[in-house]
Amino acid sequence: MTAKKDVSELIVNTDAMANLLGFTRQRINQLAKEGILEKQAAGRFPLMKNVQRYIEYLRTGAKDRGNDDDEAQALYWEEKALHERAKRETAELRLAKLKNQVHDAADVELVLTNMLVTFRTRILSIPDKIAPKVLGVKNLAEISDTVNNELLEALSELSEYDPAMFAGDDAHEDENEESVSENSAGRCASSKADDQRMG
């Protein structure tokens, strides 16, 4: 009676390994090239070690693929959340602009420039305006009151805030879009009428 050989030391050929795992010889050789299976020599595979290696490959390979899918899905939802946030912020800005709560930087710059130019002109014109009024006046308090009144009048122009000043070209653009669409509709209607007359 012969002693049973320890299966952990059993070496099998390529055909036996292929039959065991349900692959072709080519696939077994490919798995060996990829380092998934261990080959002792040409066509010689340690059975137990390679079964364990292949099971480990299946387990970790599936896990890695699952991780990749999870990461891809997480990235997708993160991008979608950023996109939705940007859409919401854009909508909020549009609404605030319609309510005259925010204004385009270009509109603000234009309005402020016009106000400051007007204010500068007004301030520079004060000496010419008050000179005749204080000419010959000896009372210092009266001169001071005249100068103060002119300065306060000039400063009051800066406090005259009107939201319509910041409206920009949006209203005109909306009107233009409406008129363009109306013109297009009119052209289409007249074109159809011409076609019907010609037909």
Image (cartoon, rainbow, N blue to C red):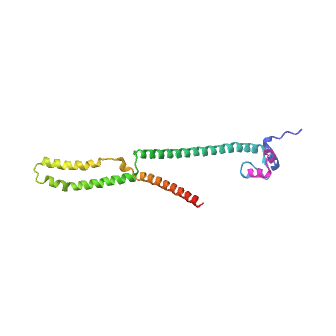
Magenta stretch, main secondary structure, is helix
Front residue of this view, candidates 83 and 21? 83
- Residue that sits furthest to the bottom in the current view: 198
Counting every numbered tag in the picture gives 0
Residue range of the region highlighted in magenta in the rendering: 18-31
- Residue 34 position within the rendered picture, expressed as x and y whole percent measured from the top left: 71, 51
Residue sitting at x 29%, y 55%: 117
Residue sitting at x 57%, y 59%: 197
- Residue 71 position within the rendered picture, expressed as x and y whole percent measured from the top left: 60, 45
Q: Is residue 185 left or right of residue 119?
A: right
Q: Quadrant of residue 52?
A: top right
Front residue of this view, candidates 22 and 113? 113
Q: In this view, does 45 lie to the left or right of 153?
A: right
Front residue of this view, candidates 175 and 139? 175
Front residue of this view, candidates 35 and 158? 158
Q: Is residue 199 shown in magenta?
A: no
Residue sitting at x 55%, y 59%: 194
Q: In which quarter of the image is the N terminus?
A: top right
Q: In which quarter of the image is the C terminus?
A: bottom right
- Residue 10 position within the rendered picture, expressed as x and y whole percent measured from the top left: 80, 44
Q: In this view, does 178 lie to the left or right of 22?
A: left
- Residue 26 position within the rendered picture, expressed as x and y whole percent measured from the top left: 78, 52
Residue sitting at x 79%, y 43%: 9
Q: In this view, does 177 lie to the left or right of 124?
A: right
